[in-house]
Amino acid sequence: MTQEQIAKTMGKSRSYIANTLRLLKLNENEKFALNSGKISPSQARTLLSIEDINERQKALEEFKTGKTNIRKVEKKSSKAKTDQVPNIDDILLEDLQEKLMDELNSKVSIRKEKNMYKLAIDCFSIEDIEGIYNRIKNETN
């Protein structure tokens, strides 16, 4: 059975199924943290990008204690460190982006252009878009 077929059967997006299957690659400690709600699925997927076992364990502990966020760990794992100190708006946007990804189970990006912010949500079908619309509509009622 393909991911697309599973997605249709379960009423989920293909990306949701793919991301969920990736979580099977976590070690037992990481799976326990995920299953007990100490880390989010997005945080768990980020752990998978860290090759060094010690760094991965350190990131897990920092996620559990709230000392780091996904973006910081991604930057460390890709060795794209900068000497620039992030401003408060960048930190808030990163946090909101992470929360939206967890809530929507989809990749989300937020960027500032001139005097406005652009929010992009990756969707793979019209059903994904309808699902997001319905969730927003139900939250505002």
Image: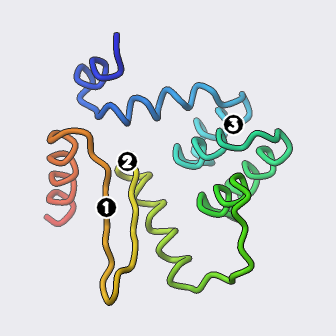
Q: Amino acid at mark 3?
A: Glu
Residue at numbered disc 1: 120
**Residue 106 disc label:** 2
Q: Earlier in the sequence, mark 2 or mark 1?
A: 2
Q: CA distance from mark 3 to mark 2?
A: 21 Å
Residue 17 vs residue 58: left or right?
Answer: left
The kind of residue tagged 2 is: Ser
Q: Secondary structure at mark 2?
A: loop
For residue 130, side relative to residue 43 (left or right): left
- Foreground mark, 2 or 1, reads 1
Q: Residues within 10 Å of mark 2 (few under 14, many from 20)?
A: some
Residue occupying image coordinates x 44% and y 68%? 96
Q: CA distance from mark 3 to mark 1?
A: 29 Å
Whole-percent x, y for residue 62 in the image: 74, 57
Identify the residue under disc 3: 30
Three-letter amino acid code of the residue under disc 1: Ala
Contact? badges 3 and 1 (CB < 8 Å): no
**Could you tell me how far apart the alpha carbons at marks 2 and 1 are, in whole angstroms?**
10 Å
Eyeballing the image, is 2 above or below 37?
above
